[in-house]
C-alpha cells in the first residue's frame, strides 16, 4: 500500500517536473510570418499555438523534446557549406606528424595533423536548414525527427521535421535583447534535447550552445559493405550532425588496419568520441587498436559511436534495438541516437588464442554461422543479402564439426529442452527403430564420428541419446547426446554407458547434475599500463576449473554472442543488453536436418530460434572452445581466424558506446 502510494507520488512528481514551464514567449512561424504564436517550453515538449483575438480555438501543436536532435539560431545566408571528410589522396601518411608541426609531443602532433588537413566541402541548399534573408531576423530553427507511419505498412519510422520561429516584432525591441532572447531559447532547447532532466538553472545563461566535450573523430571505411559509406556520410549523417551542433573531423581510412594504427597513435583525449561509419570490422579494429595502448584503461573510456556503412552492422542494430529505435532506415535512426549524445557502458570479451589476446564486442562463432559469415564475404556488394545467399549455400552442403566446448555458467546449468524426457520421447518414439549404421548414413553430410557427450569436470556423466527425424523431414541421425538408444527390437541399450529407457521410450537421466556455480564476476578494475585482468581464465594449456561444464562431440554451430543482433535480420540473443555482464552461448549439435536448420535460420530474424529444441542457450561468464576439426573458420566479430583452441571471458562494461539506454 505504502509502496503503491510512494510510486504514485513519484509518478506525480515526475509528471509535474516534465510539465514545468521553462520558457514562454511570442514568435512568428518562419518563413510564413503569419500571425503570432505563443510558445511554451517544458521538459516534455515545445508547444505552440496561434494567439487569436477572435474566439477561434486553435489546436496546440507540440514538438516532443525526445524527438528533437538540435536547435540552431536563424542564420543569415544562402547555401550552407559543411565539412565532408579528409580524403585518403590528400594525406600521404596521416599517422605521421607533418614536418612543419612544432609540437614536441608526437601524440598531440598526430591529432593536429588531422585538423590541419582540408576536408572536402559539401554544399546544402539554403531551404534545407532554413536560413534568414537578413541579419536582422532573429529566431531559431528546431530540427526534430518524430515518428510517422510508413506508407503501405503498419510500421513507423522517424522522419525529418524542421520548424523555425522568428521573434515577433513587438515582443522585444532592442536588437541586443532580441539576440539574447533567441539564444536563450536555442540553448534551452538544445540542452533539453540531450538531457530533458537537466537542471533549470543550467538553461539560464545566454551564451550559444557549444558541444562542451569537444569534437568527434569520424572514421569512414570507403570499402565497407556495398562501398557507400562516404556517400551515406555526406548525404545523411553530415546534415544531422550540423542540426545537432556536433563538431567533427572526418577521415576516410586509407587501408585495412588504418583505424587500428590511428587508435594506437593519436591523443585520444583530444576527441570527445570516435565514430565509425563502416561495418563491424572497423569497430573491431578501433577497439583492438585502443586496447593495444599502454594507457588502454583510460583510453577505452573514449565513447565509440557507430553508424551503419557495412553489410552486417551488428553493433548498430544492437544499439538501435536497445534504444527502442527501428532498424529501418538504419542510417537515420543510428544518426538520431548519435545526435542525442548519450554514452552507455558496453561489455567487451577478451578472447585468448595461442600467443594473442583479442578484444571482442560482438561474437565468437564456429561452425555454420562462421562459415556463412566468412564465405559470403565475396558477395559483399549485395549488402546484407550476402548472408542469405551464404546461408542457403551452407545449408545445402551442411557440415558438422567435432570439438569440445567448456564454459562457466552464470547460474546452475541444466541441459536444454532437447534433453528433457518429453522432447526426447517424441523423437525416440518415432525414430528409434533405426540401427546405428542406418542413422549414420542419414547424417546431413556430417563428417563427425559420433555425437556429443556432456560432462562436468567433476562427476556428471549423464549421457542420453536420441535419433530421429527433425520436423518430419529426412532422417537426421543422432541428435544431441549419445550413449543410449533403443535397439531395433526396442529392447535394450546400445552403449555401455547407458541411460535407462522406460517402457514408454522415455529417457531417464541416471544422475542429475549438481553443478554449483560460483558467481565470480570480473571486477572491471582498470589500471593504466597493466595487462587486462582475466581472473576466470586458466592458462590455455591447462585444464579448466572444476566448476566449468564440458560438452564434446559433433556440432553444427557454436556461437558466443553478447549483443542482441548479428545483423538486422538476426536477433541472435534477444535478451542480451549492451552491458549485462555475460555471454550468451548457443550450441546446435550435429544431427539436425537441413530443413530444421533452415527453419532455425528463418526464425533468427525475430529471435524465435531461442525456443527451438535444437538450440541450447546458456548464459556464461567464460568459455573455452577446442576444435578437433581443423578445417573451417572461427569468426570473432566477423574477422576470420584459423580454427584453434581459444578461451574467452566477459569484461563487464569495459567500453563505452554512444547509445541510449
Ligand atoms: N581503405 C580501406 N581499404 C581497404 N580495406 C579497408 C579500408 N578501410 C578499412 N578496411 C577494412 O575493411 C574491412 C571490412 O570493413 P567492415 O567490416 O567495416 O565492413 P563490412 O565487412 O562490409 O561490414 P560488416 O562487418 O558489418 O559486415 C575491415 O576489416 C577494415 O580493416
Image: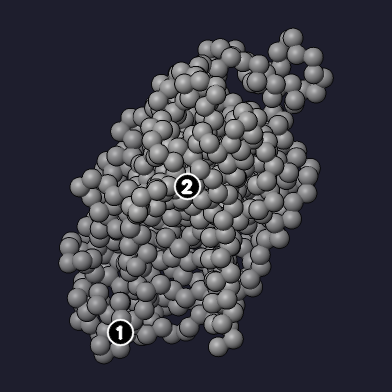
Up the image or down, 340 lies above or below 130; here it is below
Could you tell me if the residues under marks 2 and 1 are in contact, i.e. CB atoms within 8 Å? no
Q: Is 146 placed left or right of 350 in the picture?
A: left
Secondary structure type for disc 2: strand
Q: Is 255 placed left or right of 433 in the picture?
A: right
Residue sitting at the far bottom:
503
Horizontal and vertical percent position of residue 309: 43, 34
Measuring 79% from the left and 42% from the top, which residue is drawn there?
A: 529
Q: Which residue is mark 1?
A: 506
Measuring 48% from the left and 60% from the top, which residue is drawn there?
A: 576
Q: Which of 324 and 290 lies nearest the eye of the viewer?
A: 324
Q: Which of 398 and 41 lies nearest the eye of the viewer?
A: 41
Mark seen at residue 91: none
Quadrant where the N terminus is found in the figure: bottom right
Q: Between disc 2 and disc 1, whose residue precedes?
A: 2
Residue sitting at the far right:
104
Q: Which residue is mark 2?
A: 38
Residue 184 falls in image quadrant: top right
Horizontal and vertical percent position of residue 621: 58, 62
Foreground disc of the pair 2, 1: 2
Residue sitting at the far top:
100
Up the image or down, 428 lies above or below 472; here it is below
Measuring 62% from the left and 15% from the top, which residue is drawn there?
A: 117
Secondary structure type for disc 1: loop
Q: Is 411 placed left or right of 440 in the picture?
A: right
Measuring 78% from the left and 49% from the top, which residue is drawn there?
A: 527
- Is residue 171 shown to the viewer in this render? yes
Horizontal and vertical percent position of residue 492: 29, 83
Q: Is mark 2 within 8 Å of ligand 1?
A: no
Q: Residues within 10 Å of mark 2 (few under 14, many from 20)?
A: some
Amino acid at each position: 500500500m505504502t509502496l503503491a502510494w510512494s510510486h504514485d507520488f513519484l509518478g506525480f512528481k515526475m509528471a509535474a517536473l516534465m510539465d514545468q514551464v521553462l520558457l514562454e514567449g511570442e514568435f512568428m512561424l518562419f518563413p510564413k510570418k503569419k500571425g503570432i504564436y505563443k510558445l511554451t517550453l517544458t521538459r516534455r515538449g515545445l508547444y505552440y499555438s496561434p494567439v487569436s483575438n477572435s474566439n477561434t480555438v486553435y489546436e496546440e501543436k507540440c514538438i516532443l523534446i525526445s524527438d528533437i536532435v538540435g536547435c540552431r539560431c536563424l542564420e543569415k545566408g544562402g547555401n550552407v557549406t559543411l565539412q565532408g571528410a579528409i580524403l585518403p589522396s590528400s594525406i600521404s601518411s596521416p599517422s605521421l606528424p607533418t614536418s612543419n608541426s612544432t609540437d614536441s609531443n608526437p601524440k598531440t602532433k598526430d591529432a593536429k595533423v588531422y585538423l590541419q588537413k582540408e576536408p572536402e566541402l559539401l554544399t546544402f541548399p539554403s531551404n534545407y536548414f532554413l536560413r534568414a534573408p537578413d541579419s536582422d531576423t532573429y529566431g531559431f530553427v528546431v530540427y526534430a525527427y518524430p515518428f510517422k507511419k510508413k506508407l503501405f505498412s503498419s510500421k513507423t519510422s522517424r522522419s525529418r521535421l524542421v520548424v523555425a520561429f522568428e521573434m515577433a516584432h513587438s515582443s522585444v525591441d532592442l536588437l541586443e535583447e532580441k539576440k539574447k532572447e533567441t539564444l536563450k531559447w536555442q540553448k534551452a532547447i538544445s540542452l533539453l534535447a540531450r538531457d530533458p532532466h537537466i537542471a533549470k538553472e543550467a538553461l539560464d545563461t545566454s551564451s550559444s550552445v557549444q558541444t562542451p566535450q569537444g569534437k568527434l573523430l569520424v572514421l569512414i571505411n570507403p570499402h565497407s559493405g556495398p562501398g557507400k559509406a562516404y556517400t551515406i556520410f555526406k548525404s545523411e549523417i553530415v546534415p544531422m550532425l550540423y542540426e545537432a551542433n556536433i563538431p567533427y573531423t572526418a577521415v576516410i581510412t586509407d587501408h585495412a588496419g588504418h583505424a587500428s594504427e590511428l587508435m594506437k597513435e593519436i591523443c585520444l583525449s583530444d576527441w570527445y568520441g570516435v565514430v565509425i561509419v563502416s561495418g563491424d570490422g572497423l569497430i573491431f579494429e578501433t577497439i583492438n587498436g585502443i586496447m593495444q595502448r599502454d594507457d588502454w584503461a583510460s583510453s577505452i573510456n573514449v565513447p565509440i559511436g557507430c553508424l551503419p556503412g557495412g553489410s552486417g552492422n551488428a553493433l548498430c542494430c544492437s544499439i538501435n534495438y536497445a534504444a527502442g529505435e527501428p532498424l529501418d532506415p538504419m542510417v537515420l535512426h543510428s544518426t538520431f541516437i548519435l545526435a542525442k549524445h548519450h554514452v552507455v557502458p558496453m561489455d567487451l570479451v577478451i578472447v585468448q588464442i595461442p600467443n594473442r589476446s583479442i578484444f571482442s564486442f560482438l561474437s565468437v562463432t564456429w561452425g555454420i554461422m562462421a562459415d556463412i559469415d566468412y564465405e559470403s564475404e565475396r558477395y559483399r556488394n549485395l549488402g546484407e543479402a550476402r548472408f542469405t545467399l551464404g546461408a542457403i549455400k551452407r545449408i545445402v552442403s551442411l557440415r558438422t564439426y567435432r570439438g569440445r566446448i567448456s564454459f562457466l555458467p552464470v547460474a546452475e546449468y541444466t541441459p536444454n529442452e532437447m534433453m528433457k524426457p518429453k522432447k526426447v520421447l517424441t523423437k525416440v518414439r518415432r525414430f528409434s527403430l533405426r540401427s546405428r549404421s542406418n542413422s549414420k548414413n542419414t547424417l546431413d553430410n556430417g563428417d563427425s564420428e559420433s555425437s556429443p557427450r556432456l560432462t562436468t569436470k567433476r562427476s556428471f556423466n549423464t549421457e542420453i541419446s536420441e535419433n530421429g527425424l527433425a520436423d518430419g523431414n529426412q532422417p537426421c541421425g543422432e541428435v544431441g547426446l549419445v550413449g543410449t538408444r533403443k535397439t531395433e527390437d526396442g529392447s535394450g541399450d546400445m552403449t555401455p554407458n547407458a541411460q535407462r529407457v522406460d517402457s514408454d521410450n522415455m529417457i531417464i537421466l541416471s544422475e542429475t547434475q549438481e553443478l554449483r556455480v560460483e558467481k565470480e564476476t570480473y571486477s572491471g578494475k582498470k589500471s593504466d599500463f597493466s595487462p587486462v585482468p582475466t581472473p576466470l581464465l586458466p592458462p590455455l594449456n591447462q585444464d579448466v576449473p572444476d566448476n566449468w561444464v564440458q560438452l564434446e562431440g559433433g556440432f553444427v554451430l557454436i556461437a558466443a554472442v553478447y549483443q542482441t543482433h548479428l545483423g538486422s535480420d538476426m536477433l541472435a540473443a534477444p535478451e542480451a543488453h549492451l552491458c549485462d555482464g555475460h555471454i550468451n552461448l548457443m550450441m546446435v549439435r550435429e544431427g539436425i536436418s537441413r530443413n530444421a536448420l533452415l527453419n532455425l535460420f528463418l526464425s533468427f530474424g525475430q529471435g524465435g530460434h531461442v525456443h527451438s529444441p535444437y538450440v541450447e542457450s546458456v548464459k556464461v561468464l567464460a568459455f573455452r572452445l577446442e576444435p578437433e576439426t581443423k578445417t573451417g573458420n572461427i569468426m570473432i566479430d566477423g574477422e576470420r581466424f584459423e580454427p584453434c583452441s581459444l578461451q574467452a571471458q566477459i569484461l563487464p562494461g569495459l567500453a563505452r558506446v554512444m547509445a541510449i539506454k
